[in-house]
Amino acid sequence: MSLPQKDIGPHYLEEKEEVLVEKINTRKKELNGQLLLLSHHYQQESVYRFADMTGDSLKLAKHAAGAKDRNYIVFCGVHFMAESADILTSEKQVVMLPDLRAGCPMADMATLDEVQWAWEELSNVIPIGSLIPVTYVNSSARIKAFVGKNHGSVCTSSNAERVLTWALDKGEKVFFFPDEHLGRNSASALGIKDEEVVLWDRGKPLGGNPPDKIKQAKILLWNGYCTVHMQFSADHVQMWRNKDPEIKIIVHPECRHEVVAGADIYGSTETIINTISSSPPGSHWAVGTEINLVNRLNNQHPDKEIHSLSPFQCLCSTMYRIKPGYLLWILDNLVEGKVENQITVDPETAEFARISLDRMLKI
Ligand code: 13P
Ligand code: SF4
């Protein structure tokens, strides 16, 4: 969700880089022991370098949950990540997002009203107790709470297959939202047949499906997507195969199925980093994920050839909203005892959302 952001003025936004670096480091020292600065791998380098801990969504959620001694958690990522951190931390801990406009368009593609409406419609066609909801962590706290109430679990890009297996053990069918592609790629990896996977078009009655198709389905996929990962295509895979016989292709599972099927490896941002970092010197890689991560890998491994899978810059423009000036503004205020941009989830939503997050952490 994108929220209005206070104007912080040119003082922060037009400051020279070296001044910002010095001031942020000073503020971090002043807040030592109280502050935890988390950064997702898609953050731009000018922000990422200040992180105490970095990670994919799962790792960051675990870091937040484990940081019991820190009063302040500044989350350089997007809104749903900061919400998860708030849910997993205690009431006394404060979670902040440096720019409130840093939302995730995919998370916004499944609202609670839409999901509840779909659930209601489905209850007229199938025994609803046999349907297990699974939500990708890229979703609002309200959706996670709905899933918690209805005996389902959250998943991330690094455990979606495990969570789907758990859900299919528990019920007969899974309703997976909001990312069609992570759902389809995970179902395919588990050997679930194409005809057992049904797309739920959120704009149409019964998701645009006849009742019989729903009855026969094993997995119902909400038709949400990530605009960044939709920019990679099977043609890009072919282009690299033609151009470089030594190339290895690694992609994020938010890419379309034909891209994932054509790749050598797929996985979360953390998996992508670990796989490339541990590959032998001289390896060639084409990477299907956000450009800040690809550029960082390229800079860190001059002994390897690392390219973006797409010739275009696939940038997560909402992650990109977090700039060093906003980070300094948050820290300046904290040092003066003022909290800006706090992300809070109301207690009832948090209680049920925690159930679905805890289920995932246990699976
Ligand atoms: P990871 O959990 O793999 O870091 O992915 C988060 C995300 O938003 C990818 O678009
Ligand atoms: Fe959302 Fe895509 Fe950005 Fe990830 S890369 S935060 S899914 S818009």
Image (cartoon, rainbow, N blue to C red):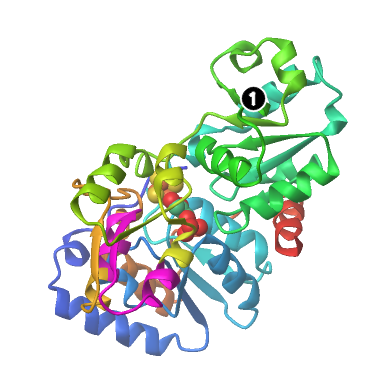
Residue 291 seen in the current view = yes
Q: Residue at x 52, y 51 (%)?
A: 80
Q: How many marks?
A: 1
- Could you say which is closer to the camera, residue 137 or residue 335? 137
- Quadrant of residue 171 within the rendered picture: top right
User: Which part of the image, by quadrant, shows the C terminus?
Assistant: bottom right
Q: Residue furthest front?
A: 245
Please indicate whether residue 183 sits to the left or right of residue 210 in the image: left
- The amino acid sitting under disc 1 is Glu
- Could you say which is closer to the camera, residue 220 or residue 63? 220
Is residue 74 found inside the magenta-colored segment of the image?
A: no
User: Where does label 1 land, which residue?
Assistant: 195
Q: Residue at x 63, y 32 (%)?
A: 112
Q: Residue at x 53, y 65 (%)?
A: 95
Is residue 281 found inside the magenta-colored segment of the image?
A: yes
Residue 3 seen in the current view = no
Badge 1 element: helix
Please indicate whether residue 220 sits to the left or right of residue 4 in the image: right
Residue 201 x %, y %: 55, 20
Please indicate whether residue 214 sits to the left or right of residue 291 in the image: right
Q: Alpha-carbon neighbours of circle 1 within 10 Å: few (<14), some, or many (≥20)?
A: few
Magenta residue span? 273-297
- Could you say which is closer to the camera, residue 81 or residue 349? 81
For the residue with label 1, is its CB less than 8 Å from the closest atom of ligand 2? no
- Could you say which is closer to the camera, residue 292 or residue 103? 292
Q: Residue at x 72, y 38 (%)?
A: 133
Residue 289 x %, y %: 35, 53
Residue 66 x %, y %: 64, 76
Please indicate whether residue 27 sits to the left or right of residue 160 in the image: left
Residue 130 x %, y %: 85, 32
Relative height, residue 263 to residue 82 (above, below): above
